[in-house]
Image (tube, rainbow, N blue to C red):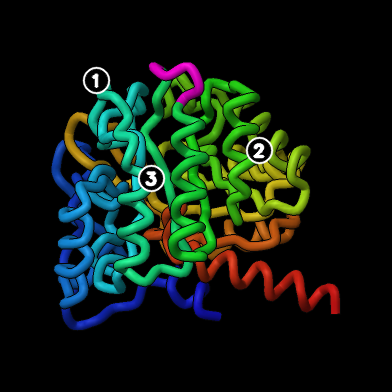
Amino acid sequence: MALQAATRQTATLNFVPVNTMLPTDGAQRRLPRWLKRPLPQAGMAYTSDVISDLRLETVCESARCPNRTECWSQKTATFMIGGNVCTRPCGFCSVPKGKTERLELDEPQRVAAAAARLGLRYVVLTSVTRDDLPDGGAEHWYRTVIAVRELTGAQVEVLTPDFLGNRMAIHRVIESRPDVFNHNTETVPRLYHRVRRNADYQRTLDLLKQVRDEAPEMPTKSGLMLGLGETRDELLEVFADLRAVDCDMLTLGQYLQPSPEHLPVERYVPPEEFDEIGELARKLGFSMVASGPFVRSSYHAGEMAEEMELTASRRQD
């Protein structure tokens, strides 16, 4: 299937190392052979121009995503709303932290315009965490989803923060009727204090459960990074917890250190092991699993959602 092919990393003639730091254990180690990405291609310039012209932020740039070359060359991007400064000091993330600015009220329309210019039929939205706002930015989320759908008719996937567990804020995003509701677990509970400071594992599960309870037909999705020191048993426990709140879709990818100031990579997980762990997740009942070194929450998100719909249709038949 297309999604499975995309998650497997094969060698090509024109590859460059990803923009990430190597783990340090007294001497620098070379990146494994599978952690290579394509050189820039023609479509990248057009995507970059659209984003620049409309003064938008993308998680592709702010989070230094290793897939930016591939995605932008295909004229797709994950839009990051609510500014480019986050209120959470997560140890893995390169999005700037500090004092936030006022929300730009025309941002929803600019995001919609970008989606239209890029010809997107599936749009992924994410945001910085805005703990400084009473609703965590939920109304801004609502307005952005509606604006994109009204202008483009595209399907919309949201990848939200936890809104500090504010159920009314979460409800407001649900009211925008996204086609997929994604909220990342990121890592196992034991590592939360180091990886996701100011976040809470149970809060993540509660958010996903609220979405399922309020909108049973709305697919839910979550993702984890591997290589931060987690064990396989811990991963399986998280998978079981996610299935207990009826999470449908799961993404698993390699953590890559964005800079020396961020958490080090404890281990590079081989592609074959990603395959094994992904298969274990499928056996627990997830409708769709994407597992591979370069898999990210929004990587081939449209294809993942489409394959889940096709799988559900076949089961009904």
Q: Position of residue 314 (x, y in %)?
A: 78, 78
Distance of mark 3 from mark 2, alpha carbons? Answer: 24 Å
Specify the quadrant that holds the N terminus.
bottom right
Q: In the drawing, does residue 58 fall left or right of residue 215? A: left
Provide the residue span drawn in magenta.
132-136
Q: Which residue is mark 1?
A: 98
Instruction: Mark 3 vs mark 2: give the one in front.
Output: 3
The amino acid type found where label 3 is placed reads Pro
Q: Is residue 218 left or right of residue 292?
A: right
Question: Which residue lies under the disc numbered 3?
Answer: 108
Residue at 85 percent across and 80 percent down: it is: 317
Label 1, residues with CA under 10 Å away: few <14, some 14-19, many ≥20: few
User: Disc 2 marks which residue?
Assistant: 208
Against 315, is 110 above or below?
A: above
Residue at 52% from the left image edge and 70% from the top image edge: 303
In the picture, measured across the screen, residue 311 lies left or right of residue 204, that is right
Tell me residue 244's x, y (percent): 76, 40
Taken as a whole, is the magenta stretch helix, strand or loop? loop
- Disc 1 residue type (three-letter): Gly
Task: Give how far apart the Cα atoms at labels 3 and 1 are.
Answer: 23 Å
Identify the mark nearer the N-term, 3 or 2.
3
